[in-house]
Image (spheres, coloured by chain):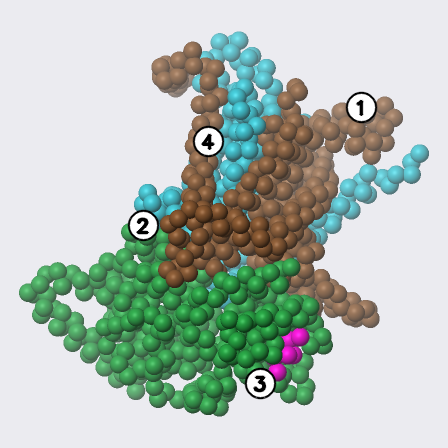
Chain colours: A cyan, B green, C brown
């Protein structure tokens, strides 16, 4: 009866395929960023840091980078409470019109980003808040909110509802029960969600394009605009810098929280 | 030589400022109106285009006036709704000066969101090309002309440059041809290449649509400026209809590409500068000064020679590598080979042509 | 000791405040309180949709390039008349289905391996490999693919050396689907992972000890239990593909536009906000209807793992 290929073989071939296709362009771009030539090519034409040097010299680059950080931080800061509470609500509490609310909360995904961008630009313009960074953070939180809600929902679900009852039985008033029992239990989902929101905001350019101008431009928008005219290796260098930031963030998170805990089997 | 020219314009500016100062003592409001802003934001295309503007206009302007010029590389199409929304909502627009295609600028002018530029001092003596067609006065100023040439890879054409645009429907080049993804620069040419005449535009575009259908069968790549460069660079295409500036920039970066004007002709068009309404009075004043500066001889010479395009300032000699080049029209004979469609006709018909283009190529 | 007392005092005050603001008798409506911020935030988009609806009911006046004042259904009529829009819509829907299917097939094993592996290093490696490409951004990543798949790219280079003719691997529909799968993979994996962590390893072992081979265990035990995660991932990938704008433009070669590109063109190329708005309304309606249908059919009424039965 053992005519089936072994489990490991099948799973690992699929995973390897995914790994290869995911990583190949990354390797190429990293390699291409060190070229001495004028264009992106692989293998690169020589080895030099000149494109990185050029980035460092552009102070518009560092300004935009800092702004991107701020915007992403605002986005995550808003997403964590709003998303967590929404996830708790939709899973733990009996709400009427459950399905309608779910479809409603998926609007950020069913509306194309271009449309969201234009619509928010018009509305924010109307109420005169354009020109600041915080509306950009708010908008980015909005368009990616389902990710946060979903992330927390999944851990809420795995949460034993009895824990809440147990806490109440021990005499814990609601707020304490929340902070002492509920929140720590959904922490893994909250952290995955926060990480995802930060990453998404850090790379977002479509909606940001409409909500920023030359004075408040964020890095992804800057890159997107540069790419419309010509693609040069400094864009590859920017990508590599981004990757380093990502690695740093993940490493930090791992040290602080231990990404392992919520990823492994129970 | 250049320094004296800069001093000349500085002197002019100082004179102007001096006059303003005198007037200001009597009229405080006037003084405030000419107060220099910290920076001017000018929308520009990136790559070779932006570099030319920076070196030819922006940096000299900063040297003469002390006002920083920041270039905004937002795509021309994408800044349109941002400016329009700002003007409609009574907010300050995101840029001071828009370096735009004349067609786009005409659309903004029709919408009534541009500032009148008729009082610019350097308008006098410019070629008639500088005046917008079909509009009253100067809601925008045209600054140079450019041609949508037939760019090609010499390796793929050992017998010499293609003589006719029909090369685009030649099965030999199947999958190795490229156009702008909205048909810009080629719509009128398609009519002529398809057997029609210039008089057929715009009422009878059918020969053009027929040509497009044959083109579609030849599996073209559709994209924008950056894509053409990428495709030539990576050997994906042999022939493209693109602006001569892009082809020249690619050439200067070591890519083997040349260009020609085939027998049916090439579309010639203009780009211009305009200012959105709603800027504070002093910023608007200096934005106009910027445009005025861009129309001066020094700026036109440097800017347009870096781009390799014929300026609207008369009497400037072409750069060495472009003398006699058909993409650099100077004599009436040169212009006769090119196809020019007036902006109002383009503005009115572009949507129709684009819808048909989409229908054929997205099908 | 003092610190603890201080903490208790603070918490007691908080509890009293909470009780005053949200007394016991409202306790049942706590759910609504929790979800209100999210509802309000998404409400901003609803306002935006309102603008779009308004725009879609006005046609463009080509002499002033502003929308006419009169109301009309002309934009919608235009969409129905021109066959190209239907073709683009079908192309997009097909891609959404294909991408969702392929992504789930690739994401599930990836998530499974990531969760079940005993090695912590491997798990982190898989996570990092998943997200790193994301930071390169779509356009630059696509350039990387051009270098690999282009006519003079790495793969064709190898083929030519081996004596084979070159293949058209990029700038077609297949390349777009491929690119989209790449893009969606990290999201799908992240959404499936919690579902798998919730399935204890012992359940699979139990199934196998009862005589099922691993494929049967997958089919009858693991997949059904992971279903809500799969449905969640599926919905996200489907809606994101349906509304994606960048990938078809970048990898499609310009002749495989998706609906979002058509919307972009209407707003920016044609400066016709009315037509663009009409297209957007159509897209949002189709997307929401499909999502509602999926919810109804699969019963995963909540954005969650456990379905309503439990």
The secondary structure type at the circle numbered 2 is loop
Nearer to us of marks 3 and 1 is 3
Relative image position of residue B150 (x, y in whole percent): 57, 79
Mark 2 crowdedness (10 Å alpha carbons): few <14, some 14-19, many ≥20: some
Nearer to us of marks 2 and 1 is 2
Q: Judge if badges 4 and 3 mark residues of a common chain.
A: no
Mark 4 crowdedness (10 Å alpha carbons): few <14, some 14-19, many ≥20: some
Look at mark 2 in the image and give the residue it sits on: B89
Separation (CA) of disc 2 from disc 1 = 66 Å
The span picked out in magenta is B164-169
Q: How many marks?
A: 4
Q: Is residue B166 magenta?
A: yes
Relative image position of residue A20 (x, y in whole percent): 71, 52
Q: Please report the residue visible at 79 percent of the width from the left and 32 percent of the height from the top.
A: C219
Look at mark 3 in the image and give the residue it sits on: B263
Q: Chain of mark 4?
A: C
């Amino acid at each position: 009866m053992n005519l089936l290929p072994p489990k490991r073989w099948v799973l690992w071939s699929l995973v390897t395929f995914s790994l290869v296709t995911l990583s190949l362009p990354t390797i190429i771009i990293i390699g291409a960023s060190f070229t001495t030539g004028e264009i992106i090519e692989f293998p690169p034409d020589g080895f030099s840091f000149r494109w990185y040097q050029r980035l460092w010299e552009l102070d518009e680059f560092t300004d935009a980078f800092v702004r991107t950080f701020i915007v992403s931080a605002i986005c995550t800061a808003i997403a964590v409470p709003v998303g967590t509470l929404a996830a708790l609500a939709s899973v733990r509490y009996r709400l009427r019109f459950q399905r309608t609310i779910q479809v409603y909360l998926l609007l950020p995904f069913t509306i194309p980003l271009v449309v969201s961008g234009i619509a928010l630009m018009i509305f924010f313009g109307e109420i005169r808040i354009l020109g600041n960074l915080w509306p950009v953070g708010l908008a980015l939180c909005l368009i990616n909110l389902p990710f946060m809600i979903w992330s927390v929902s999944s851990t809420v679900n795995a949460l034993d509802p009895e824990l809440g009852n147990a806490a109440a039985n021990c005499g814990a008033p609601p707020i304490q029960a929340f902070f002492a029992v509920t929140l720590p239990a959904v922490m893994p989902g909250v952290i995955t969600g926060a990480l995802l929101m930060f990453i998404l905001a850090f790379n977002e350019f479509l909606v940001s394009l409409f909500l920023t101008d030359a004075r408040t431009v964020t890095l992804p928008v800057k890159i997107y605009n540069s790419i419309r005219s010509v693609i040069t290796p400094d864009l590859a260098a920017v990508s590599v810098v981004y990757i380093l930031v990502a690695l740093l963030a993940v490493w930090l998170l791992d040290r602080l929280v231990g990404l392992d805990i919520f990823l492994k089997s129970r | 030589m250049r320094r004296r020219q800069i001093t000349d314009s500085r002197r002019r500016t100082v004179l102007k400022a001096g006059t303003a100062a005198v007037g200001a003592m009597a009229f405080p409001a006037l003084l405030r109106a000419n107060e220099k802003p910290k920076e001017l934001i000018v929308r520009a295309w990136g790559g070779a285009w932006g570099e030319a503007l920076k070196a030819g206009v922006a940096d000299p302007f900063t040297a003469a006036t002390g006002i920083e010029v920041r270039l905004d590389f937002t795509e021309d199409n994408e800044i349109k709704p941002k400016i329009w929304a700002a003007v409609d909502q009574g907010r300050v627009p995101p840029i001071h000066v828009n370096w735009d295609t004349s067609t786009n600028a005409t659309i903004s002018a029709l919408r009534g969101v541009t500032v009148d530029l008729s009082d610019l001092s350097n308008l006098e003596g410019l070629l008639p090309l500088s005046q917008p067609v079909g509009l009253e006065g100067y809601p925008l100023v045209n600054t140079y002309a450019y041609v949508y040439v037939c760019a090609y890879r010499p390796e793929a054409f050992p017998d010499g440059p293609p003589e006719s645009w029909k090369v685009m429907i030649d099965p030999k080049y199947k999958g190795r041809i490229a156009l702008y993804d909205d048909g810009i620069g080629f719509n009128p040419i398609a009519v002529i290449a398809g057997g029609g005449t210039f008089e057929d535009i715009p009422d009878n575009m059918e020969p053009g649509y027929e040509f497009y259908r044959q083109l579609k069968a030849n599996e073209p790549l559709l994209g924008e400026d950056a894509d053409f460069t990428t495709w030539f660079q990576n050997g994906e295409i042999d022939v493209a209809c693109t602006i001569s500036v892009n082809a020249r920039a690619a050439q200067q970066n070591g890519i083997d590409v040349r260009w020609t004007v085939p027998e049916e002709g090439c579309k010639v068009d203009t780009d211009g500068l305009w200012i959105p309404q709603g800027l504070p009075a002093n910023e608007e004043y200096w934005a106009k000064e910027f445009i005025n500066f861009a129309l001066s001889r020094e700026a036109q010479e440097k800017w347009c020679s870096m781009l390799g395009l014929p300026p609207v300032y008369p009497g400037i000699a072409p750069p060495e590598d472009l003398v006699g080049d058909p993409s650099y029209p100077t004599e009436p004979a040169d212009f006769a080979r090119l196809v020019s469609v007036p902006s109002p006709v383009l503005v009115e018909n572009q949507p129709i042509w684009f819808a048909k283009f989409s229908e054929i190529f997205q099908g | 000791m003092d610190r603890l007392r201080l903490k208790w005092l603070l918490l007691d005050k908080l509890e009293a405040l909470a009780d005053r603001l949200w007394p016991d008798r409202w306790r049942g409506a706590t759910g609504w309180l929790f979800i209100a911020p999210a509802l309000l935030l998404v409400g901003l988009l609803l306002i935006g949709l309102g603008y779009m609806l308004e725009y879609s009911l006005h046609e463009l006046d080509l002499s002033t390039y502003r929308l006419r004042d009169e109301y009309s259904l002309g934009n919608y009529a235009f969409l129905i008349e021109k066959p190209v829009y239907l073709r683009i819509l079908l192309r997009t829907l097909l891609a959404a289905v294909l991408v969702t299917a392929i992504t789930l097939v690739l994401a599930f094993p990836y998530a499974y391996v990531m969760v079940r592996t005993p090695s912590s290093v491997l798990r982190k490696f898989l996570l990092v490999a998943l997200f790193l490409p994301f930071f390169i951004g779509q356009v630059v990543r696509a350039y990387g693919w051009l270098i690999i798949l282009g006519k003079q790219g790495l793969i064709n280079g190898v083929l030519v050396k081996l004596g084979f003719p070159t293949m058209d691997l990029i700038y077609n529909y297949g390349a777009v689907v491929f690119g989209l799968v790449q893009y969606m993979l990290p999201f799908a994996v992240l959404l499936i992972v919690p579902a798998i962590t919730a399935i204890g390893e012992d359940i699979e072992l139990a199934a196998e000890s009862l005589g099922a081979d691993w494929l049967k265990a997958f089919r009858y035990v693991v997949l059904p239990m992971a279903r809500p995660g799969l449905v969640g991932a599926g919905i996200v990938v489907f809606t994101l593909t349906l509304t994606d704008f960048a990938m078809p433009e970048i990898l499609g070669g310009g002749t495989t536009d998706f609906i979002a590109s058509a919307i972009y063109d209407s707003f920016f190329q044609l400066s016709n906000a009315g037509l663009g708005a009409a297209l957007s309304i159509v897209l949002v309606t189709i997307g929401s209807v499909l999502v509602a249908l999926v919810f109804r059919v699969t019963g995963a009424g909540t954005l969650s793992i456990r379905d309503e039965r439990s």
